[in-house]
Amino acid sequence: MIKVLIADDQAMVREGFGALLGAQPDMLIVGDAADGEAAVARARELRPDVVLMDVRMPVMDGLEATRRLAAVDGGPRILILTTFDLDDYVYAALRAGASGFLLKDAPAADLINAVRVVAAGEALLAPKVTRLLITEFASRPTTDRPRPAALNALTPRETDVLLLIAKGRSNQEIAAELIVAEQTVKTHIGRILAKLNLRDRAQAVIFAYETGLVTPA
């Protein structure tokens, strides 16, 4: 069972998402929270697998709550939910350690799938979100940055995989492009995350752009 905690300052939203996800045979709603501070406390108490995290909440916003939960080893995966489709939220949420970003007006099936995706350890970076992320980096001044020493630990094939992850490719697409088995891609990704001390694919994308490994077109 995927244990889910819902953090949102609107009771109707918490109840609606709770009813939807609680009806899934592989999901269990373990609790909810009306602000970021309560979300952090309840997550530490209830140890959910996934936290649905609103961005704008009283006491402590969702970004800071995400940052605190992501800093704990073995902490929950964070799926950011918001009505605000803004560049700074996308970047800040992923930089804080979120594993995914979804707008509240997304279809119910997308939300259900998103919970399963992040619970499985994958990152949920929809094409629209990836475009916003690329736009964020493209707007920054370019500088000549030395190759980070951490990248030297990667094999040439692992570097290729990291580049494709940063371009938003799925495991299946990476396997097809590199002409390898999908399981081989998963193995490469696991090694990349371990060598670079990254939490998941979302952090891998941030790392690739911030280090200059990938330059936005």
Image: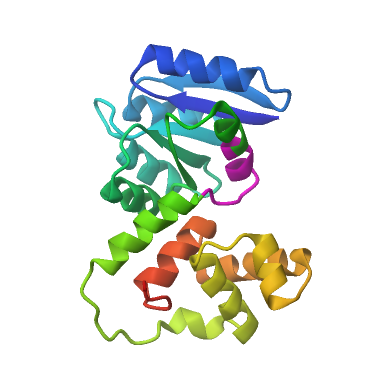
Which of the 4 image quarters holds residue 177?
bottom right
* Residue furthest left as drawn: 141
Which of the 4 image quarters holds residue 184?
bottom right
Q: Position of residue 156 (x, y in %)?
A: 60, 86
Magenta span contains residue 27: no
Q: Nearer the viewer, residue 47 or 35?
A: 35
Q: Position of residue 211 (x, y in %)?
A: 37, 75
Q: Nearer the viewer, residue 24 or 86?
A: 86
Magenta segment: 114-124
Q: Position of residue 196 (x, y in %)?
A: 51, 71
Please tell me which residue is depicted at 49% across the width and 15% down the height of the picture: 16
Q: Position of residue 113 (x, y in %)?
A: 62, 37
Please tell me which residue is depicted at 56% across the width and 71% down the height of the picture: 164
Q: Is residue 83 left or right of residue 175?
A: left
Q: Is residue 175 left or right of residue 54?
A: right
Q: In the figure, 51 relative to 9: above or below?
A: below
